[in-house]
Amino acid sequence: MNLKFRAKDYKSDDSFESAEYEYFGNETEGWEIKRNGQPYLHLGPGYIPLKTISCGVCSTDIDRRFLPFPLPQIIGHEVLAEGLGENQGKQFVVEINDTYEARGDQNPDQFCKEGIPTHSPERRVLGIDRLPGGFGPYILAPIHAAISLEGVSPKAAVLMEPFAAALQAILASPPKPGDHVAVLGPRRLGSLILAALASYRKTNKSDFRITAITRHDHLVTLSKSMGADAVVDLRKTDISNLKDQFDIVYDTTSTTSGFESAIQIAKREVHLKTTNGQIMAGIAHLTELVVDELSILPYSDANARFHWKKENRHNQNVFLFPGVSESIKENLKKQFTVFEGSASDAENILNSEKFSNHLPRFDLVVVSNPEELSLAIRPNPNHENSLVRPRGAILVDTNNENKWSEETKLVSKFFSEGKEIHSSRCGDFHMAISLLRDNPEITKALETNLISHRFSSDQLELAYATAKDPSSVKVVVDFN
C-alpha cells in the first residue's frame, strides 16, 4: 500500500509547518516512511494503516517541545480512526505505545517478559516519540494497539485514551474507605479523573468523597457534572486554608504552582498525572517520573516492600547513593541484595553480568538529597533510562533535611511527614471501554460536557491555540 499526503509537523519553536509524507509497505513486510522525499522512519512488520477520523488535543501536545524526543513530528495521540483495506468500515481507538507486544513480535524484550511492555526502552509512542500521530490524515498503528470500537459511541471514543489514562491514576492510587480526595485542575484530564473516580466509586460500592479544585466558572459547572461532590473555587478560598485537607490529591494542572499547591494540601499522597518537562519545587525530571510511573516515598520498612498492587513480585535489588545513613544501609542489607555508589557506578552495575538476562533496573533506589533523587530518575543525559524499574520506587532518607536546598524545602518537609508522591501514565483501553459500557451515565456525561471545541484539520493551529486557552476544556480536530 502507498499513502501519500501532506500534514502539519510540530516544531521545537512551538509552531507548525507543512510537510509531505509517504507511507509505503504492508503489515507483513513492514513500512518505509518518507518526509519531504527523504527517509524518516523504517518500521518492521506488525503495523496496519488507519485513516484518522478525529484526534483530541491534550496537555502533552501543548508541552511537546519540552519532552526529550525528536522534532519535527506529526503529533497527536488521542485518536479515533477507521480501517483501510480489509478493515474498511471498522472504527478503532489506538493505544499509544508501539512495543514488541503491540506489534505481535514473537521475540519480546525483558520488559515485556516482566509484564511491563509499555515501558520497553525500544518503544515508540504514537504522536509523541517518532511514530507519526493523529494530527495527520493517516497513521500506522501496531496491530494489537488498534482496539475495535464496539459498544461505545464515537463521541465518547475520541476521549478513550485520556479516559484510560485517568482510570490508570485511580488504579495506581485508589481511595480508601472514608477518604476525601481532590482533583486539582479539573479541566482536560482532570475532568476525566473526576469521571473515573465517580465510576470507580459506583462500580466498587466505595465510600469516599470527591472534591474538585479550580478557579474558573465553567470548570465549577463541569466538575459537578463529571461527578464531583463539592467544588472549591480558589478565587474565593486561599490555598493555605486547604492545608492537609485531602487524603489524595490528583494533580492535573501541568504547572509548577499547581504541584506546589498539591504538596501543601495533601494529607497522605500526591498523584502526579501531568507535567510540563520543567523543574518543579526544585526537583528535576518529574516528567520522566510520570513517563516511568515511578513513586517517591519516605524510607520505611514497609515502603521497602513497595510494588504496584496488581504486580505479583518481590523487590530484590536495591541501590543506595552515598549520602544514605548507615542505619538504613544495614537494615536493607539484611533483606535485599544491596549495591552502593554513584550514578555512574549504578549504570555500570546494570550493564554488567550481574544483570544479564534480568531487567536492567534496580527494584528500589534510596537517596538522601534532591540531586540524588534527580539522578535516580535520569542518571545520564545521553539516554532515557532510569536506575529504578518502571512502577518501582525511589525511597528518601528523611534524616538528611540539611542536604535539601531552600527551594526544595517544601518537598523535604512533605516526605519527612511520611507523605508520598505517586504517578501514572497511559491505561488499559479494554478496561476503560468496559467501564464506560457499564456506566452509561458517565459516557453520557463525557459526550455532553467535555468537548468544548471542534475544528477541522485545516484549522490545526487554531485548535492548538484554543487548547492553550483556559476557557477551553477538550479541543478535538476532525478529519473529513
Image (tube, rainbow, N blue to C red):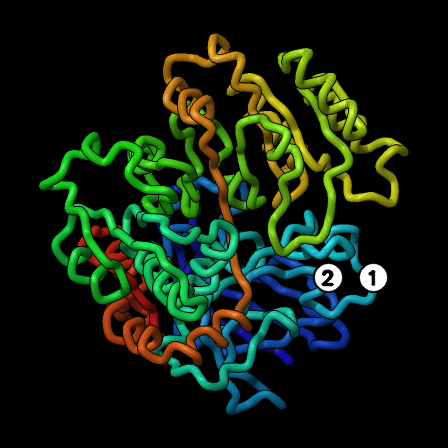
Tell me the quadrant of the picture where the N terminus can be found.
bottom right
Determine contact: label 1, label 2, CB under 8 Å.
yes
Q: Which percent across, then down, holds residue 324? A: 63, 15
Q: Alpha-carbon distance for marks 1 and 2?
A: 7 Å
- Amino acid found under the numbered disc labelled 2: Tyr
Tag shown at residue 100: 2
Q: Earlier in the sequence, mark 1 or mark 2?
A: 2
| Residue 92 percent location from the top left of the image | 51, 79
- Residue 473, by quadrant, is bottom left
Callout 2: 10 Å neighbours few (<14), some, many (20+)?
many
Q: Nearer the viewer, residue 104 or 338?
A: 338
Give residue 108's quadrant in the image.
bottom right
Give the residue displayed 68% in from the left and 69% down from the top: 31
Q: Judge by depth and name the residue closer to the eye, 269 or 215.
A: 269
Q: Which residue is mark 1?
A: 107
Three-letter residue code for mark 1:
Asn
Res. 14 in view: no
Left or right: where 10 falls relative to 148: left
Q: Nearer the viewer, residue 228 or 88?
A: 228
Question: In the rendered image of this protein, does residue 221 appear above or below residue 384?
Answer: below
Secondary structure under tag 1 reads loop
